[in-house]
Image (cartoon, rainbow, N blue to C red):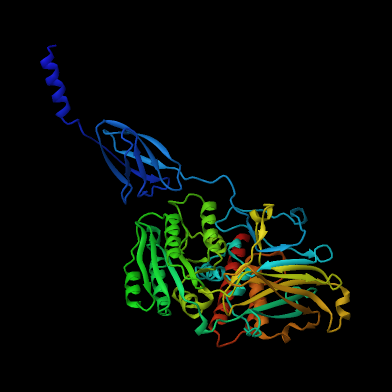
Amino acid sequence: MKPGIAILLAVLSFYISPAQYYLRGEIKDEKNNPLSNAKMQLHSTRYMYYSGSTGSFGIMSTRPSDSVSVYVDGFQPQCVLLDATHYMQIVMKPLYASSILHKNGLLSFTTNMKLEDRQNKPITNETYSTLLENEFTPARKFPETAFAIHTDKASYSNIRRFINMNTEVPVDAVRTEELLNYFNFDYEPPPADSVFGFKSYLTNCPWNPENHLLFLHTCARKLEPERTPPSNLVFLIDISGSMDMPNRLPLLKSAFKLLVDNLRETDTISIVVYGSTVGVWLQPTCGNEKKKIRESIEELYPGGSTPGTSGIRSAYRLAKSQFIPGGNNRVILATDGDFNVGQTSENELEEMIVQHRQWGIYLTCLGVGMGNYKDSKLEILAKKGNGNFAYLDNEKEAEKVLMTELSQTLYTVADDAFMNIRFNPLLVKEYRLIGYDNKYKNIVDTLSKMEGGEVGPGHSVMALFELQTTPAIQEVFSSDALARVSINYKLPGDSVAHITSFSCSANTMDYVELPVGYQFAGAVALFASLLKKSKYAYHASFNDAIILASSASNKSDLLQQEFIMLVTKAKKIYARSRKNRKS
């Protein structure tokens, strides 16, 4: 070839644009949900591209085929060969953590008791965390036990949803302490120099006459309105496609608009959403700008996938930027709990929540929906976030949680609170804590420890023990102590441990002579045992629970009257189920 022609060809090849190819496709998860904002690195150029809101992508390339690495939070990275002649369907597989990053939290703990001292119970694979019911424990061998003072109430309203749907309640959905927490039994303000007040009663057990019931009742101090700290609240709202039902996003919108009515000028409100988009929906806004906040809530619409972890991370980042020293800094997560996109791992999510809790930012969880409702996940997140957990099955419940009991829901008077009980083995042969049942996985994990709970102002906590007493109980004097009780807690934002101690009298009172609030609490505990199909309530019936509740109820208390209606409905549901099983 002549030198001139060679030079000409070189110049032409330099100026002629290379051929252009279009590499197209979409990225989804295994449930066929589109994955937006997925990172895609083209190997030939090392350029980074991102998928759109529907998971689709289009990349201009000089090559008819090229390889790409795909990254999505919570999913295994993939290397994929793209071909311009094919529309690529990329399916991402979830990433599961293989290591445990935290110690599990027990709800109750008996000193020195090993797993082999418990009876094993068959574990079923249910939507809810599998619980092991507390058993009778010998007081001589294990005189000391404790339980975390948690004030969650979600189990009650969730049970109500099942019963109103005319169906049986999943056994592990029944958490007795949350049914008891739902009612503020006989609240009495504590002494002026104490956060907690305390009372105890010993009586005969109505469903097992051979045993006794011990009622332990503690009331937390209420906040004076003028001393209520300013709030930095971040509403973290799930607006994914799964929330597009009347009992999900529309219910949450109504709930949050109710909360807005109680905001003050000293409060700061922000809204973060996750779904078709992840990010700040409402920048930090003063609490007296109620119209602006309500309009922002009303404009929420559902769609897209559920990148829950990304949303939580954004909410905490915003809460931290607006942090109020000495204030009430809290993220309020509202969702059906179905985080199926963007989650790196549950353990890493929990670790992030624990870290922010240590910085003074708490987490409250509001659950909604049915079918894909993840009760176990929200319960764990609330506990890790030192917050509380409620389930909203209707607008009345939203009003109760976010208006009537707003201070209990959003504020704190005690952290890491738990009650320690040491029984007198001369008077108590065996004892059984009713409720506060531990998750099976926490019991078998030797690293598990008991974590105290967060207590809101004005909260009334009722706990019951069923006791097998010794003959010496008949010979006691008024000064004899059945048990020594201590309430252990820390003040919010303080690391100093406080202990308030009490003594439980061994004097026995007839059940019908108890204050009616305690009698009603006994009916609630029995109802929970029946729903759990507890072996300890084998000889009792729903009729017994109805009789106990009816004789002790306040006719003007709508919650108590509703409870009696629920027990009556449950009686029919479970009677029908027994009949169907026999036929």
> Residue 279 occupies which quadrant of the picture?
bottom left
Residue at figure coordinates x 47%, y 62% from the top left: 370
Residue at figure coordinates x 28%, y 35% from the top left: 86
Quarter the N terminus occupies? top left
Q: Is residue 128 left or right of residue 35?
A: right
Label tally: 0
Q: Is residue 28 left or right of residue 400?
A: left
Q: Position of residue 458 (x, y in %)?
A: 58, 80
Q: Position of residue 528 (x, y in %)?
A: 63, 70
> Residue 455 occupies which quadrant of the picture?
bottom right
Spot the residue most to the bottom: 556
Q: Position of residue 280 (x, y in %)?
A: 36, 62
Give 417 or 375, whichever is nearer the viewer: 417
Q: Position of residue 459 (x, y in %)?
A: 59, 78
Vertical order, 199 against 19 (above or below): below
Vertical order, 573 against 512 (above or below): above
Q: Is residue 551 something one can see in this rendering?
A: no
Spot the residue most to the top: 1
> Residue 243 occupies which quadrant of the picture?
bottom left
Q: Is residue 81 left or right of residue 13?
A: right
Give 165 or 10, whichever is nearer the viewer: 10
Give 94 or 135, whichever is nearer the viewer: 94
Q: Is residue 263 left or right of residue 194?
A: left
Q: Is residue 289 something one can see in this rendering?
A: yes
Quarter the C terminus occupies? bottom right
